[in-house]
Image: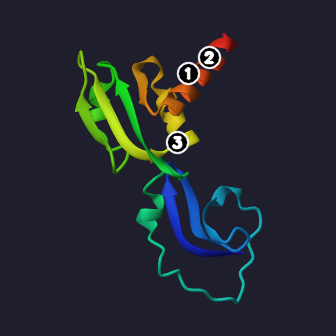
Amino acid sequence: TVDPYRIWFFKGSFYLVGFCHLRKEVRIFSIDRIRKLTLTEKSFTVRDDFDFDAFMQSGFGVAGGVPETVRVEFDERVARYIEDKVWHQSQKITPGSNGSVVFKACVALTPELKSWILNWGSHARVLEPESLREDIRTEAEKIAGLY
């Protein structure tokens, strides 16, 4: 049972944000994955302490979590593209060396963030946190092992 708070469209998919009675917390559900829907006569009110923007703030996409400071250096080949777009509301982009830029944001270390970094291939280098550097390095080694 879910009390639906908001329908959210993100990157081509719709999501339902609402209070999950099973887990006793606000969760995000992919509408594409809902197999059965039953309308009930029960009513509810959105919790007074729920703020959608604050709820979504730590995520780098759909998934959220505990935010950490993330710094990624992008080389000169993609620097301009990184500078021209808002990737996250907490981002700060500063010049690096040799035409590179450093992207800094306070976000959760989610699979979406890791996928975004890997998408840039050798044009992106994680500076911090060390745990994210290690995750990206491990994934890059697995990819290289396929070839």
Helix, strand or loop at label 1? It is: helix
Rendered location of residue 74, percent (x, y): 35, 25
Direction from residue 66 to residue 77 in the image, left or right: left
Give how far apart the Cα atoms at labels 2 and 1 are.
6 Å
Residue type, mark 1 in image: Arg
The residue that mark 2 highlights is 141
Quadrant of the image occupied by residue 84: top left
Give how far apart the Cα atoms at labels 3 and 1 are.
15 Å
Rendered location of residue 19, percent (x, y): 61, 73
Decide which of tag 3 and tag 1 comes sooner along the chain: 3
Rendered location of residue 60, percent (x, y): 47, 46
Q: Residue at x 33, y 20 (%)?
A: 75
Q: Residue at x 31, y 40 (%)?
A: 85
Residue type, mark 2 in image: Glu
Quadrant showing the C terminus: top right
The residue that mark 3 highlights is 109
Quadrant of the image occupied by residue 35: bottom right
Instruction: Mark 2: give few (<14), some (14-19) or many (20+) Cα within 10 Å.
Output: few
Give how far apart the Cα atoms at labels 2 and 3 are.
19 Å
Instruction: Mark 1: give few (<14), some (14-19) or many (20+) Cα within 10 Å.
Output: some
Question: CB atoms at circles 2 and 3 under 8 Å apart?
Answer: no
Q: Residue at x 48, y 74 (%)?
A: 50
Rendered location of residue 112, percent (x, y): 54, 41
Please state which of residues 111 and 15 is positioned toward the viewer in this rendering. Answer: 111
Quadrant showing the N terminus: bottom right
Direction from residue 124 to residue 30 in the image, left or right: right
Please say if 84 is above or below 16.
above
Quadrant of the image occupied by residue 110: top right
Residue type, mark 3 in image: Leu
Instruction: Mark 3: give few (<14), some (14-19) or many (20+) Cα within 10 Å.
Output: many
The residue that mark 1 highlights is 137
